[in-house]
Amino acid sequence: MSERILLAIAALLAALVVGLGLFWHPEPTEWQLPKLASANGGDFTLQSVDGPVSLSDYRGKVVLVYFGYTYCPDICPTSLVATAEGLKQLKPEELAKVAMIFISVDPERDTPARLKEYVDFFHPAIVGVTGTPDSLADIARAYGAFYAKQRVDTAGGGYVVDHSADTYIVGPDGKLAGKIAHATPPDQVVVALRKYLNQP
């Protein structure tokens, strides 16, 4: 990825996020926590460029979990820009209690090194991880997330990955607590995070 292309993408996405914040306010919807994840916290261990990363490593923090991939043309960058802007609005002491894990659903192309380059572009609090196809499928199932490879000859590598676009919120106790809908404006991301940061 060249720096010029990344800067162009960032400018376009920043404009989109501003527009979303001004004109789009999603209605809250009913959502049942997946039984497996709510029972055991949906704990997992996956691989980052710096070694294994477990959800339990972040016990005591509010953790955002997002399923996506670095070749995603629009949904992932939109979500990550909005979330990153929300993280930037937190006070330093609040940000110290928040982490985000970006789980790649494209292990064939997303190496740990590529994931680090990708997530670092959005925010240093985001850690990119991957794993075996079977482990990723088990984790996604635990969270109620879905993804599926779709053949597209014009795409890089000849395919895209359709995937759910919500960001899952894991509370400081390590249990799945809620989710943030795709394209939620940054100020609402802050509201959602503070709800769990301020819980006793």
Image (cartoon, rainbow, N blue to C red):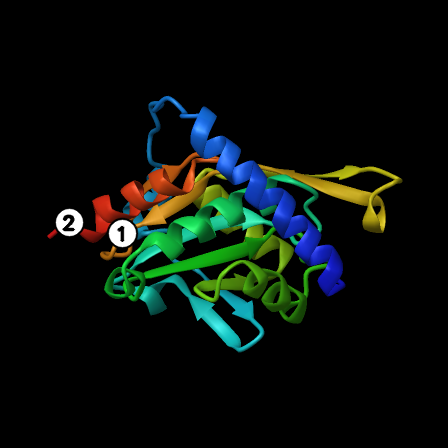
The 10 Å Cα crowd at callout 2, few under 14, some 14 to 19, many 20 or more, is: few
Q: Nearer the viewer, residue 182 or 14?
A: 14
Task: Return the x and y of residue 53 as percentages of the image width and height.
Answer: 46, 69
Task: Indicate the quadrant where residue 97 lies.
Answer: bottom left
Q: How many marks?
A: 2
C-beta proximity under 8 Å, tags 1 and 2: yes
The numbered disc on residue 58 is none
Q: Is residue 130 visible?
A: no
Q: Which amino acid lies under the numbered mark 1 shown in the image of this protein?
A: Gly
Task: Indicate the quadrant where residue 47 lies.
Answer: bottom right
Q: Nearer the viewer, residue 129 or 62?
A: 62
Say what secondary structure mark 1 lies in.
loop
> According to the image, label 1 marks what residue?
171
Q: Which residue of the protein is positioned furthest toward the left in this rendering?
A: 200
Q: Which amino acid lies under the numbered mark 2 shown in the image of this protein?
A: Gln
> According to the image, label 2 marks what residue?
199
Task: Return the x and y of residue 153 as percentages of the image width and height.
Answer: 89, 40
Residue at figure coordinates x 71%, y 51% from the top left? 71
Residue 6 as seen in the image, left or right of residue 33: right
What whole-number distance in Å separates the C-alpha atoms at marks 1 and 2? 9 Å
Residue at figure coordinates x 53%, y 78% from the top left? 50
Residue at figure coordinates x 43%, y 44% from the top left? 142
Q: Nearer the viewer, residue 141 or 78?
A: 78
